[in-house]
Image (cartoon, coloured by chain):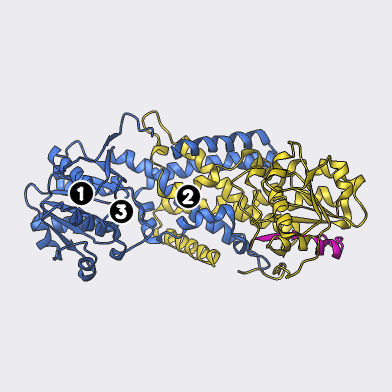
Chain colours: A blue, B yellow
Amino acid sequence: MFFASKVKADAPQKNPKKLGTVVIVGVGMIGGSVGCGLRAAGACNEVIGVERHPIKEAIGVGAVDRGLPLAEAVAKADVLVFSTPVGVMGALAEQAAPYLKPGAVVTDTGSVSGHVAERLQPIFGSRYVAGHPIAGKELHGVHAADPDLFQDKAVILSPDARSDQDAIDKVTALWHWLGAHTITMSARDHDRVFACVSHLPHLAAFALMGAVSAARTAELDPAAFAAGGLRDFTRVAASDPLMWRDICLTNKAALLEMLDLYGAQLGIVRRAIETGDGQALTDLFAHANTVRARMAQ
Amino acid sequence: MFFASKVKADAPQKNPKKLGTVVIVGVGMIGGSVGCGLRAAGACNEVIGVERHPIKEAIGVGAVDRGLPLAEAVAKADVLVFSTPVGVMGALAEQAAPYLKPGAVVTDTGSVSGHVAERLQPIFGSRYVAGHPIAGKELHGVHAADPDLFQDKAVILSPDARSDQDAIDKVTALWHWLGAHTITMSARDHDRVFACVSHLPHLAAFALMGAVSAARTAELDPAAFAAGGLRDFTRVAASDPLMWRDICLTNKAALLEMLDLYGAQLGIVRRAIETGDGQALTDLFAHANTVRARMAQ
């Protein structure tokens, strides 16, 4: 993998420090997997969950030891993890802040780090470190929680220049307990990278389904012949509309940049087809082969 | 599946008629699989291969009984199958035509039926029926031939108004011998459908690799973080550049239509992100979910 100077990658520590009491706000698939994994590893004294939904299910799958209302839970936290949808994290952080112990650290699992950091950094200051685990998300809800979800996966941490070193260390230890390795880059770089490798492909697949639908005539529906190429796009196009709305709204600048890069590439393909320029098409497709091979390494 | 009035679907016959001598021009992965499958099924007296490359390998994998030069092979054919790249079929058909027996039938396995039919129909007239098996193509060459490749797969036949019924019946029988079912539609409809469900997704994936490459800076390469969304596109982006150049050049009109439909959808997404129109994004993504679900049926 080519990382470059701006990025720092750390392998998991052998014996990370114990985490004390961990509070997870939003115990869905990701938050639940964090809880299950920490409890299974014996990483902490207790995992407390904060949930809109009844906490019984989260206890049942082993994601948390118990549930508490936000204020009571936060008051006990040594490590506070926000794992709700990105759109509601800011408001919950504001409600939580007055109850946080001195010395406690705060992190999150949101997929748009810049937006979350913009909201949480002013609230929690040097005690906050933005995080984004790169792990599968086709399933939703705490019943899909998996203690091994983060094993050998990457987690992007985006500490601020103002973040305390011990806050960075504690959040790093949390992910090492879960078997993940951490990669450090700025929130801005994070959002640009994931606009490119995750958000843009999702939009490309959503738009492709729209085009397939628009191509339907009264007499013939191409979707009935979904084959080869199209099938690879369908998993992505089944993703949750509300989650992707929030990602689009919160990672606007990077996504507009990537959509324009994509539009330019499609424009090159279109012109080559229109003018019958076989060499331009071959060059473009061969280049795609190369990029793909680089990614697969 | 929604097929509509223009399309006729046939389940495999229980006891298709024997095919006599089958000649396959171009014994690669597809042509070789046709040969292996027909020989394994006992569908014909003999399979003769015509190949630029030494025929030994095709004999070795059981794809043909023997090889002959084009003219000699064609003179023996009851069923003549062109399975070369689309770009060279026309020239080979012209060379073959003078040697064809009266009563022999001609078909092909090309993925752009309109272009092939335009070349082969004037040469073979009522004895020609265009065909396109919808089967996986990641592998190339006769060593990848598989007698079961077409089992339970669809084959699109595009006979002309001028095609003889017995030619249609013989070509249909060939695919039924291989365990495939046949679907009949016009070459024009075929090319529009596959521009939509196969060619456009390939171009979308190729262009996406181009965008990922263009997003690389001196300091950070997004491709190093290839995750989730992007991975689903990589298989498609690894496809053969020359094959896709030929498809682009031979299915121009339908592909330009599909690229424009796709561009319009991406434009809607871009505008919604730019103006922060969450409702438009949710609607578009939810519609994509629906189209996807319809395809999966």
Q: Are marks 1 and 2 on the same chain?
A: no
Mark 1 and mark 2: span between their CA atoms?
30 Å
Give the number of the disc on residue A149.
Answer: 3
**Disc 3 secondary structure class:** loop
- Which x, y percent locates residue B13? 73, 69
Find the magenta span and give its range: B153-170
**Is residue B141 visible from the viewing direction of this image?**
yes
Q: Residue A227 lies in what quarter of the image? A: bottom right
**Residue drawn at 68 percent across, 36 percent down:** A277
Circle 3 or circle 1, nearest the eye: 3
Left or right: A243, with A228 as reference point: left
Give the number of the disc on residue A107.
Answer: 1
Count neighbours of disc 2 (C-alpha within 10 A) and say few if under 14, some if 14 to 19, many if 20 or more.
many
Say which of B71 and A87 sits in front: B71
- Which x, y percent locates residue B159? 80, 60
- Which x, y percent locates residue B87? 74, 41
Left or right: A131, with B102 as reference point: left
Mark 3 and mark 1: span between their CA atoms?
18 Å
Say which of B96 and A242 sits in front: B96
Q: Mark 2 lies on which chain?
A: B
